[in-house]
Amino acid sequence: MSTHATDTGTADGFDSMRELLAKANEEKTGDQLAGVAADSEAERVAAKRALSRTTLEQLRENPVVPYDDDEVTRVIQDAVREPVYERIREWTVADLREFLVDERTTEREIRSIRPGLTSEMIAAVTKVMSNMDLILATSSMEVTARCNGTVGGAGTLAFRLQPNDPADDIEHILDATREGLAYGVGDAVIGINPVEDGVGTVTAILEATHEFIEEWEIPTQNCCLAHVTTQMEAIRAGAPADLVFQSLAGTEAGNDEFGVDVELLDAAHDLAQRRCTSTGPNVMYFETGQGAELSGDAHEGVDQLTLEARCYGLAKRYDPFLVNTVVGFIGPEYLYDGRQVIRAGLEDVFMGQLHGISMGIDACYTNHIQADQNDIENLAVLLAAAGANFFITVPMGDDVMLNYQSNSYHDAAALRQLFDREPAPEFAEWLEGMGIWRDGRLTERAGDPTIFT
C-alpha cells in the first residue's frame, strides 16, 4: 500500500503498512535502534494522521509479516471470526478509537468486536491514542480468568508474589513467600524465576511451594518460570505445577530464539490441561516485553509495539490465566527512560485487555535505565486506575536474583487502599480467615511472616 498525509505543509509518503505503523509509534529507542522510527515529530504526526484514516480491512490484508512466512501471523489471522470482522472491516482506526473511548460504549459491546480484530488493528489504534485514552479505554474492559483463584473481577487487584533467590535456596524462597502472604499478596501466583534451568531445581521449587500452599490451604497458584520444556519434563515426572510458563515473541523467528514454536506451545497447553494440579480452566502464564524481538535480531523490520501486540495475539490462542509485560526490564536500548517505560506499560496492558486476555504488568526498571522508583510507582498508579488485572511484587521492591527494581509488597497494600480494591475473592476470604485482612484493609497482624511458622 502507499499512504500519503500532509502536515505542517510537508508531504510524507509511506510505502507499506509496516512503515506506516512504525513511524506512527511514540518515540522508542528500540525503534530508533532498528532503524524504523520516524525521523522527526512532523513525520510521526503525519504517520498518525494517515494511520487514523486507514481501514481495519487494510490492516487485515497487510499483516506486518506475511502469512506464508510466519506462524504467528497465521495464528492471528486464522483466529479471526469472519462474521464479526465483516461488521467492522470498513471502520477506520479513528472510528475504532472513538468507539473505545466513547462513554456510551459498554464492556459487552467491546467484547462483541474482539473476535473480529487482528493484532495489527489493535496496535494501530494504540498508536493514535493518548495516555489518558489508553487508561480510559482499559478501564472499560473486564477480563476474568480462573486457575485455583479468580483474577480480573470488578473491584479487585491481584499481585504475583515473586520470592526469587540467587541460590535457589528453598528456605529463603519460603521465607520471602511468608512475608509476601503476610502483606496480602500472592493471589495472582506464587511464581519463582529459577537460577538453574534444570528439572531437579524446578521440581524442588514446585514441590516446596505446592506443599506450603496445601499446608495453609491458600487459594492461589504456584509456577516455576523455567523454560517450558524443563517444566514439561518435570510435570511428566510428577512435579506439582498449577501453571505452565513461557516467554513469547511476536514473530516466528523471535520465538525460535526463545526455543519455542506453536507446535511446542500447543503440546505444553495440552499437557497443562491434563496434568497441572490446579482446577483451571486457565492454566498458562506468559511474559512479554517491548523489544524482545530486536534483542534476538528477529524483529523483521517491524516496530516493537506492533510486535508486542502480536505476542498477545499468539497468547490468546491458549486462553491464559496470566500474561504480563516486563516493561522496563530489557533495558534502555528499547525503552530509554521513565517516560518511555510509562507509555509502553499503558500500551501493553491496553492491548492485552483488548485482545481479551488477563493482562498484568511488572512495573519495573533496571539500574542502567534512565528511570527510578518514582517512575514505576507512577506507572503502577496509572495502571491500577486503568484496571490492570495484576502486578508483580518483590521483597522491598528489589529482586536480588534478577538484579532489577519492581513494586514491593508494601506497594500492593498502598494500591489497594488508594483505589479501594480487594484481593481476588477466594484469596480475600482466606486472608480474612488468617486475620490479615478485614473490612477492605490490612489488619495490625499484616506484615508478620511468623504467622506462617
Image (cartoon, grey):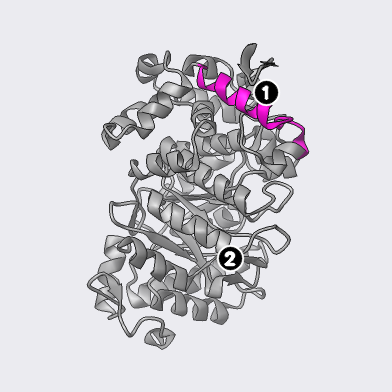
- The residue sitting at the left extreme is 439
Residue 48 coordinates in the image, percent (x, y): 57, 26
Q: Position of residue 397 (x, y in %)?
A: 56, 70
Quick one: label 2, few (<14), some, or many (20+) residues within 10 Å? some
**Disc 1 crowd, CA 10 A, few/some/many (<14, 14-19, 20+):** many
Classify residue 225 by image quadrant.
bottom right
In the image shown, does 52 or 62 lie closer to the viewer?
52
Taking the spot 56% from the left edge, 50% from the top edge, the residue there is 342
Q: Secondary structure at mark 1?
A: helix
In the picture, the disc for residue 162 is none
What type is the residue that disc 2 sits on? Answer: Gln
Of 270 and 380, the residue lying toward us: 380
Front residue of 419 and 350: 419
What residue sits right under mark 1 in the picture? 19
Left or right of 386? Residue 172 is right
Magenta segment, principal secondary structure? helix
Q: Nearer the viewer, mark 2 or mark 1?
A: 2
Query: How many discs appear?
Result: 2
What amino acid type should be assigned to the residue bearing mark 1?
Answer: Glu
- Quarter of the rendering occupied by the N terminus: top right
User: Which comes sooner in the sequence, label 2 or label 1?
Assistant: 1
Which residue position is annotated with label 2?
A: 373
| Residue at 58 percent of width and 59 percent of height | 364
- Can residue 306 be seen? yes
Q: Vertically, is 141 above or below 1?
A: below
Q: Is residue 84 magenta?
A: no
The magenta segment: 33-54
